């Protein structure tokens, strides 16, 4: 907010709207303690209201909204809502809109998948949203998996592993590097809403804390993570996991937030070289590196983040391939995005665009020219003008030559 106060001209402060949307972390807190969640929102609202902006309120958005706003952001930045242009990009082709990108979002507490399926009929109305943007109707599939963000997924996995480890309070974890040690309070595990189903099996009294000892093995880590996805039950023609409807994947997808940050660290965001096999090979090598060696190479990275990249990368691969059912062939349709045209990709821009009604429901009467089209036209007309002037000067100085050729 201080940054905004400095960047935005003082004369526009009172005209500038401010919105605050809270996501999965606050959704989890509201499930556990609604009164506390309300107190936090009230405190945040009170703080923001002290600034000279037009504060429009703070609220917790739903998982569906989070997924939809991410989808709007990507396609808005990629100009996918506007019509294709023909005739040197001057005339819109009637009824010919560009295919939209799907959106893959990964946070700490939840993950979202959103896209326009090829078949408009849906088997689960709870997973469908309808938009009319720029004169076209969109039937969008979206689902938010609460507790399957990377941080909550790790807590689930540790809770599950603690069950299997017996009662010695030690977890030998292949998702952490060999030589790595971490101690966690039992309360940090059993108080997390996403691990509540494991609560009855925790040896609370005997072991107030648990020690994690890394063994650094990608394939064992992957097997452990796959147990978080229940793919044995599906009441629909096709599902992702945990009995949630998922239509066949369609088109390209933009993967952002933690999807991008983890893949960027692993140097796997290059589309020319990105394959699932390359990611597997990279993770096998990375996870097997000893912790001391890793600290020497990446000493500037915060220990918590560095220690969890093996798990996060393996989890992303399992989620995309086994959870969402991308294949080796469709992997090329995933584009890991941090920014598009210098703008960060995420749900927040779509949230703002929706609340400020900046995306019209109908196609504008005149399609604004893109910068490249504008430059092309200016150069073209300038050349035509120069040629006309040269011909005019030539005719003016040698009119007899011109008329002789005409005869």
Image: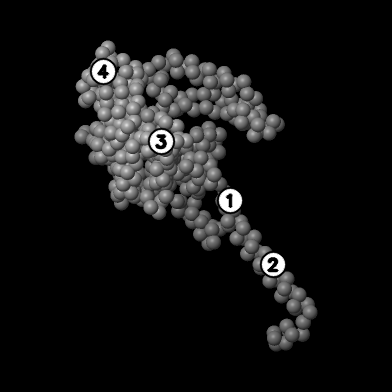
Which residue is pictured at 29% across the width and 47% down the height? 327
Instruction: Please report whichever mark, 4 or 1, sits nearer to the chain's N-terminal start.
Output: 4
Q: Label 4 to label 2, Cα distance in Å?
A: 82 Å
Drawn side of residue 201 relative to residue 356, left or right: left
Q: Which residue is drawn at 61% across and 56% down?
A: 374
Camera-nearest label, 1 or 3:
3
Q: In which quarter of the image is the C terminus?
A: bottom right
* 58 horizontally vs 311: left or right: right
Q: Decide which of 388, 252 is in the foreground and name it.
A: 252
Can you see residue 201?
yes
- List the residue tagged with mark 1: 368
Q: In this view, does 294 lie above or below 27?
A: below
Residue contact at pointers 1 and 2, CB within 8 angstroms: no
Chain-order first, disc 4 or disc 3: 4
Residue that mark 4 sits on: 202
**Mark 3 or 2 closer to N-term?**
3
- Pointer 1 or 3: first along the chain: 3
Q: What element carries label 3?
A: helix
At label 2, counting other C-alpha atoms closer than 10 Å, the crowd grade (few under 14, some 14-19, many 20 or more) is few
Name the residue: 31% across, 40% down.
Answer: 288
Q: In this view, does 41 lie above or below 132?
A: above
Name the mark nearer the viewer: 4 or 1.
4
Between the residue at mark 4 and the residue at mark 1, the CA separation in whole angstroms equals 62 Å
Separation of marks 1 and 2 at Cα, in angstroms: 24 Å
Query: Going 21% across and 25% down the picture, which residue do you hit?
Result: 164
The reply to whether residue 128 is visible in this rendering is: no
Cα–Cα gap, marks 3 and 2: 65 Å
């Amino acid at each position: 907010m201080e940054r905004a106060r400095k960047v935005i001209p003082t004369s526009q402060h009172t005209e500038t709207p401010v919105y605050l949307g809270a996501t999965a972390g606050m959704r989890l807190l509201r499930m556990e303690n609604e009164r506390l969640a309300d107190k936090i929102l009230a405190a945040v609202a009170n703080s923001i209201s002290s600034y000279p902006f037009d504060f429009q309120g703070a609220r917790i958005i739903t998982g569906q909204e989070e997924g939809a706003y991410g989808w709007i952001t990507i396609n808005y930045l990629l100009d996918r809502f506007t019509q294709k242009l023909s005739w040197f990009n001057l005339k819109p082709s009637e009824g010919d809109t560009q295919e939209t990108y799907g959106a893959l979002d990964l946070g700490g507490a939840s993950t979202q998948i959103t896209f326009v399926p090829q078949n408009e009929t849906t088997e689960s109305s709870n997973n469908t949203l309808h938009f009319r943007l720029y004169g076209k109707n969109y039937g969008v599939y979206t689902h938010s998996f609460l507790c399957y963000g990377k941080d909550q997924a790790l807590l689930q996995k540790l809770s599950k592993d603690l069950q299997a480890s017996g009662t010695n309070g030690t977890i030998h974890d292949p998702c952490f590097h060999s030589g790595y040690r971490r101690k966690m309070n039992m309360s940090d595990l059993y108080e997390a809403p996403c691990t509540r189903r494991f609560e009855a099996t925790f040896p609370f009294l005997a072991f107030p804390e648990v020690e994690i000892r890394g063994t650094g093995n990608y394939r064992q880590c992957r097997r452990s993570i796959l147990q978080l996805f229940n793919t044995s039950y599906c009441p629909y023609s096709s599902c992702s996991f945990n009995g949630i409807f998922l239509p066949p994947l369609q088109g390209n997808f933009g993967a952002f937030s933690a999807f991008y940050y983890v893949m960027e660290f692993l140097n796997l965001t290059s589309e020319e070289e990105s394959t699932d096999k390359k990611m597997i090979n990279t993770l096998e090598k990375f996870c097997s590196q000893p912790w001391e060696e890793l600290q020497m190479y990446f000493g500037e990275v915060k220990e918590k983040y560095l220690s969890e990249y093996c798990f996060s990368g393996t989890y992303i691969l399992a989620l995309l391939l086994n959870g969402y059912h991308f294949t080796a062939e469709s992997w090329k349709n995933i584009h890991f995005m941090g920014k598009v045209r210098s703008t960060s990709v995420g749900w927040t821009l779509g949230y703002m665009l929706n609340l400020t009604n900046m995306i019209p429901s109908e196609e504008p009467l005149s399609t604004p020219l893109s910068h490249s089209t504008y430059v092309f036209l200016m150069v073209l007309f300038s050349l035509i003008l120069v040629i006309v002037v040269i011909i005019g000067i030539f005719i003016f100085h040698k009119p007899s030559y011109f008329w002789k050729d005409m005869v």
